[in-house]
Amino acid sequence: MAKDSTSEITKLSARGLLILDAAQNLFYHQGFDETSLAMIINEAGGSRRSIYNEFGNKQGLLMAVIQRQVKAQSETLTSINRDIPAKAALNQVCFRFVQGMLSAELMSLFRLVVQQVVKFPELGEMIYQKGPMAGIVPLVDYLDWLVEQKELKIENSHFSAQMLIETAQGPLHTRSLLLPNKKTSDEEIKQQVAQAVDIFLKAHQL
């Protein structure tokens, strides 16, 4: 079983971080199934014991790769500027978030994960609970704050935050997933995000 503690990336040793970097690179370029522990060790050094001690197994390594990306995306959401109007703040933070989600790195990770959860449903549950469900908390907190400020009317901030993020990613996410060679411009992201934010604000206006 994958080690549950892999979400605590900050507790990894220097060797653990090297292993994580090597595993991520190999997973993205070779595929999860095609990457062996021997390949990871050859690139990062260390031993199988190093991997077992810090990650549990190869699935644990994949979870750690996912958690590191979730942490980075979550930190994007924590940068919401509460000193400017909600529309501007949501446009800013959603643009940065979608920009990250559409990056080649995260697209590679998304494709990798989809392949694995079909074979390991329990991995999908772990990813869902420790990824999207946890990573969206900063945006949920901001929406709760907007409700307290009597700027918006929201019955379920967690659900509304999920809907905003999904709408902001919109068709561009599907296009990037299916057409990896077609680069998405910042202007395309800005336009899609602006439409998503407008729809969101209209749906939650007082």
Image (cartoon, rainbow, N blue to C red):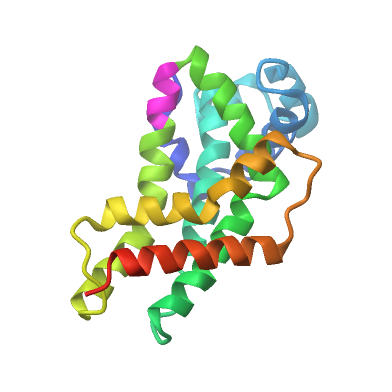
Q: Is residue 91 above or below residue 168?
A: below
* Camera-side residue of 118 and 179: 179
Q: Give coordinates of residue 28: x percent, y percent.
A: 72, 32
* Dominant secondary structure of the residues highlighted in magenta in the image: helix
The single residue placed furthest to the top in the displayed view is: 119
Q: Is residue 52 above or below residue 9?
A: above
Q: Residue at x 68, y 50 (%)?
A: 103
Q: Is residue 109 above or below residue 105?
A: above
Q: Residue at x 47, y 15 (%)?
A: 120
Q: Give coordinates of residue 66: x percent, y percent.
A: 54, 38
Q: Give coordinates of residue 70: x percent, y percent.
A: 50, 47
Q: Which residues are magenta?
A: 121-126
Q: Give coordinates of residue 176: x percent, y percent.
A: 68, 43
* Camera-side residue of 106 and 39: 106
In this image, 117 relative to 159: left or right? Answer: right
If the image is split into quadrants, where does the C terminus sit? bottom left
Number of marks drawn? 0
